[in-house]
Amino acid sequence: MHGSRLRLYLTRIMAICILGTFGLGAAYWTGIHPVLEKSLFILGLAIAGVGAAGRAWATSYISGQKLKRLIKSGPYSLCRNPLYFFSMLLGIGFGFCTETFTVPLVITIVLSFLYYFQIRNEERRLQNAFGVEYESYIDQVPRFFPSSRCYYEPDEITISPRLLKKGLFGISFLLIVIGVFELLQGLHQAGMLPILFRIY
């Protein structure tokens, strides 16, 4: 299975497993600490929103251009892997939307492990494809955490509508999962689903 497809597949499996967990359990803070409960959810929405917007931004730059030319502008002038950085934010935001501390921690660990190997593989391909140009890019732009030191944005970019659409619908999946989580929480509170355990 291709690396990006495997990553998407594993990410979706993790999201479905989390939903399954909350089908049987609930956040410890639900009904006990309502201010903390809602604060975690709002924090999660804010982080997920930044992650979704950033991922859409990065997708618009890379769609149709990967391995054709080295993208070094826009989000790719902030860090070399903005898609992974903003995907991480989206995942962590989703984790906080469960109103727990455990789920965002687990998501951070799993995605860090997954992205580390994916980034290493992509770096090898880019090195082979672009050589000295990529080495110069590595020297100027950080791998993962953004820095505005070399930020540059062109007046125009070329976008592949098909690939952009695919990327945007990929983003919508986790946002839909957040809605399903809220539905499960409502069913727990209405007594229609049992709460077998609590998650911190």
Image (spheres, helix red, strand yellow):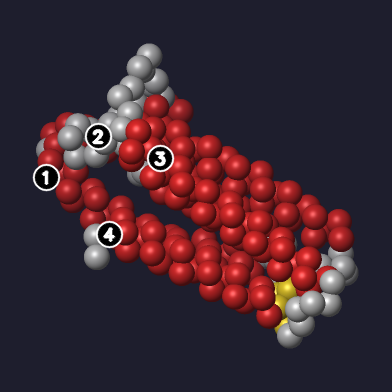
Q: CA distance from mark 2 to mark 4?
A: 17 Å
Crowdedness near tag 4: few (<14), some (14–19) or many (≥20) residues, C-alpha within 10 Å? few
Residue indicated by mark 3: 165
Q: Is residue 153 above or below residue 145?
A: above
Contact between marks 2 and 4 (CB within 8 A): the answer is no
Residue topped by disc 4: 3
Identify the mark nearer the N-term, 2 or 3.
2
**Residue 1 in the image: above or below residue 137:** below
In the image, is 75 to the left or to the right of 117?
A: right
Report the Cα–Cα distance between label 4 and label 3: 20 Å
Residue 114: assigned label: none
Q: Amino acid at mark 2?
A: Gln
Tally of numbered tags: 4
Q: Which residue is mark 1?
A: 128
Residue 142, percent from left and from top: 37, 39
**Disc 2 vs disc 3: Cβ atoms closer than 8 Å?**
no
Give the x, y percent position of residue 2. 24, 60
Q: Earlier in the sequence, mark 1 or mark 2?
A: 2
Q: Secondary structure at mark 1?
A: helix
- In the image shown, does 149 or 18 lie closer to the viewer? 18
Q: Which residue is mark 2?
A: 65
Report helix, strand or loop for mark 2. loop
Disc 3 to disc 1, how far (Cα)? 29 Å
Seen in the picture, residue 68 relative to 111 is either above or below; the reply is: above
Q: CA distance from mark 1 to mark 2?
A: 16 Å
Location of residue 9 in the rendering, given as x and y in whole percent from the top left corner: 38, 64
Question: What SS does tag 3 mark?
Answer: helix
